[in-house]
């Protein structure tokens, strides 16, 4: 959904919908960075143990990378995860993420239903601002992405949209933990060494997401 909202053209949006509805055997293989995201989420929960967590994760990933019985995709994924984990380690002190408490994300994570469209929201961590009794959710983005100003602008827009979806999800499902607050939900973009939060006033962005879902629901049968 976040990528759909930030697609450069209507044709690009339609392509995203077609791939979602009919993935098929020719769907491109995408590195998912599961090991990196899990390791970074653990670091968020235990800042004091960050170096130890990174060392242990990288040792396991190096074994996966160097094991000749693994296929090339598994070995490539292991090396990419190592690169991302080490990038997070280097940037960790400068990232604006330390302060709240991080907890494991709730599993299973129920979807959002927005104007007839079921949107999967699977965050990497819960964010608890104990000082202000606020709650949000964090996504960890590990992909490298394209270069150039236009691509960077689309990436930033997608990150803010994803943080807004995380806030909407927290509003529906996490109010028992505190007040869902837009800027407590975030996307940690590791390769960009940046943190993107939902806007303090998210009403307009939420309205745009709702309008997009209304349109998707209308055209879905013909995609």
Image (cartoon, rainbow, N blue to C red):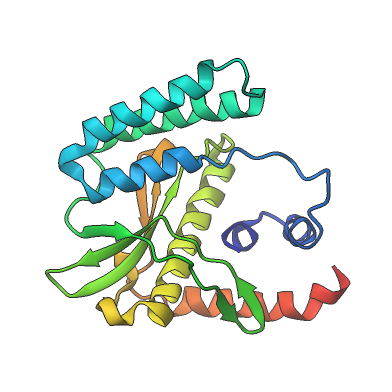
Q: Residue at x 74, y 41 (%)?
A: 28
Horizontal and vertical percent position of residue 9? 72, 57
Q: Which residue lies furthest to the left in this view?
A: 131
Q: In which quarter of the image is residue 117?
A: bottom right
Q: Where is residue 70 in the image (x, y as percent from the top left)?
A: 62, 23
Q: In this view, does 46 lie to the left or right of 163?
A: left
Nearer-the-camera pick, 170 or 14: 170
Asked if residue 183 can be seen in this view, the reply is no
Left or right of 13? Residue 184 is left
| Image point (78%, 63%), residue name | 21
For residue 190, side relative to residue 222 (left or right): left
Judged from this view, the residue extending furthest toward the bottom is 115
Q: Residue at x 44, y 75 (%)?
A: 168
Q: Nearer the viewer, residue 63 or 203?
A: 63
Number of callouts: 0
Q: Can residue 137 be seen in this view?
A: yes
Please determine whether, in this image, residue 117 is positioned above or below residue 166: below
Q: Residue 71: x, y in percent?
A: 66, 24
Q: Where is residue 92 in the image (x, y as percent from the top left)?
A: 25, 38
């Amino acid at each position: 959904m976040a990528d759909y909202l930030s697609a450069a053209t209507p044709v690009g949006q339609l392509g995203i919908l077609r791939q979602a509805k009919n993935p098929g055997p020719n769907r491109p293989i995408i590195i998912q960075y599961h090991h990196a995201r899990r390791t970074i989420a653990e670091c968020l929960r235990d800042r004091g143990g960050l170096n130890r967590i990174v060392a242990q994760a990288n040792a396991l990933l190096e074994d996966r990378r160097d094991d000749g019985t693994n296929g090339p995709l598994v070995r490539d994924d292991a090396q990419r995860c190592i690169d991302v984990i080490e990038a997070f380690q280097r940037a960790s002190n400068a990232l604006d993420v330390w302060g709240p408490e991080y907890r494991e994300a709730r599993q299973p994570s129920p979807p959002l239903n927005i104007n007839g469209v079921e949107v999967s929201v699977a965050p990497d961590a819960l964010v608890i601002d104990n000082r202000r009794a606020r709650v949000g959710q964090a996504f960890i983005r590990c992909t490298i992405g394209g270069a150039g100003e236009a691509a960077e602008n689309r990436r930033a827009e997608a990150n803010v949209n994803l943080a807004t979806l995380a806030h909407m999800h927290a509003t529906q499902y996490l109010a028992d933990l505190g007040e869902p607050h837009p800027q407590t939900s975030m996307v940690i973009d590791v390769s960009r060494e940046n943190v993107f939060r939902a806007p303090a006033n998210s009403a307009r962005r939420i309205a745009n997401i709702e309008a997009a879902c209304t349109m998707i629901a209308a055209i879905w049968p013909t995609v």
